[in-house]
Image (cartoon, coloured by chain):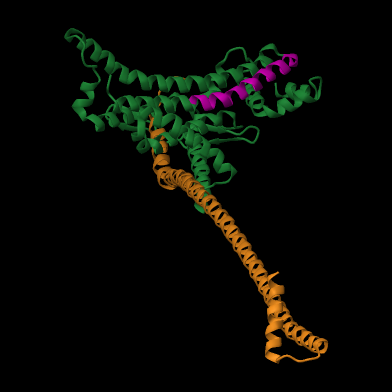
Amino acid sequence: MVGLLSDSTAGSVGMHAARVIADTGRVIADTANAVAAHGGDASNGNWIIEHVSNSRTLNFLPFGEIHLPVFPPFHIGGLTLDMSITKHVVMLWAVAILVFIVMKIVARGYRKSLIPGKFASAVEMVILFIRDDVVIPAMGERGRKYLPYFLTLFFFILFSNFFELVPYASTPSGNISVTASLAIIAFLVVQISGIRQYGLFGYFKGLVPPNIPLFAIPIIAIVEILGLFTKPFALCVRLFANLVAGDIAIYSFIGLIFVFGTVLVAPLAIGFALFIEILEVLVSFIQAYIFTILTALFVGMAIHQEH
Amino acid sequence: MLVQLDPGVIIWTALTFGLLLFVLRKTAWKPILKALDTREESIRQSIERAEEAKKESEKILEENRKNLARAEERAQHLIKEARELAEKVRNESVGRANAEANKVLERAREEIERDKQQAISQLHGLVAELAVKAAEKILDEAIDESKQKKLVDNFLNSLRKN
């Protein structure tokens, strides 16, 4: 399969396609390898699932691969905890370090003067957007206290989404455990901010709107309490599904070349894959924005319980 | 496989995110947000100051305009006064000169009159004397000089009356 690919690159596809192939080279190399690993049969999608899933190796084809350390699982009560470092954990750390470096550079830009450089200004625009158009409209002036959380959340998700487009990297946002973790944190932030605002009893009492008939109260209460859990669940699934869908779409278009077994589909397949990749840049921003603004709205609803 | 929750990854994510939040809050968000607030505050103050300065300058401009108008008025007044003064001085000097000339003229006239009177009275005497001498010569016999004189005077008086 790899041989077929390199023959075709030099052959009939032409200069333009060659450039596009160079752009998406890592996808093709990975795909070819994955397909080869499954006995050359690309028509079942297992190789795609395998590629977007978590794994215990960092794949740097053709330079080789790194096997990540495996820890023996912990047993806490009836739970089995496997704290092994996996591919997505490494990517999470990479995201965190990248966000830290970027924000450190931005923060240093303000040390000399209040008017920062070009790079810091660009990031500042996003920070101001989160502050003035997301957090404060959703939560009012009290939102300023929560700004560090929302800014970290937004940039963490954004950079994590961008990792989908980085060669050899893999997006942690495409792992449902990662998005679930972020949603659990969001859930805790919402509940704790609400309880801190109204007290434990006052907060849960405030969930049921006043002035409703007595017989409806149990039903409403159940619906409202269910709503507390469905909101972060939706956050979790939305982010995960969007990111993993983009990834799968790209791999599917590339996989078409191998399904048809002819290089003639390559220009079309790679063109579509490239289109999806560019679309994913937009999706990265939108999903980070949605996760952040919805969390801000939920916190805003929790601390302003007037119905 | 794809939608299976892995508690290990959940905990790693929470730890990573928590640590990132903790570190960024201290090292990045606090200075950045503070710088933004400071800048916004300074912009607000600058605008306020500019507004104040504008008001102040407008006031000064208005005052200047008033001062200018006042100075203009004063200048006009001074010019008018000076002109009046000059006019007065000129009139006065012309008047004085006229008076002087008149006085000189008068004096000259008086002198002439006096000289004329003197000449006339001298002429009276001379004429009387000549007349007497002429009469003496004619009569050849002298009358008493005083009688003659009286005679001539009478004659002259009669002349004058006529």
Determine the residue positioned at 20% across, 26% down: A202
Q: Which image quarter is the C terminus of chain A in?
A: top left
- Residue A196 percent coordinates (x, y): 25, 33
**Could you say which is closer to the camera, residue A243 or residue A145?**
A145
Q: Mostly what secondary structure, the magenta segment? A: helix
The chain assigned the colour orange in the figure is: B
Residue B69: x percent and y percent? 55, 51
For residue B99, what is the image quadrant? bottom right
Can residue B1 be seen here? The reply is no
Residue range of the region highlighted in magenta in the rendering: A262-287
On screen, residue A226 versus residue B131, left or right, reads left
Q: Which chain is green?
A: A
- Residue at 63% over, 14% down: A41
Quadrant in which the N terminus of chain A is drawn: top right
Identify which residue is drawn at 57% across, 25% down.
A282
Q: Is residue A76 above or below residue B141?
A: above
Magenta stretch: includes residue A199: no
Image location (x, y in percent) of residue A153: 43, 33
Which of the 4 quarters of the picture holds residue A118?
Answer: top right
User: Foreground: A260 or B159?
Assistant: B159
Residue farthest toward the left in the current orientation of the protein: A214
Observer able to see residue B81: yes
Q: In this view, does A234 lie to the left or right of A269?
A: left
**Between residues B80 and A101, which one lies in front from this camera angle?**
B80
A276 within the magenta span: yes
Measured along the vertical axis of the image, is residue A21 above or below residue B55? above
Which residue is drawn at the image coordinates 58% and 46% (left, top)? A117
What x and y, as percent, mark residue A49?
A: 53, 19
Label count reads 0
> Which one is nearer the viewer's eye here, B59 or B160?
B160
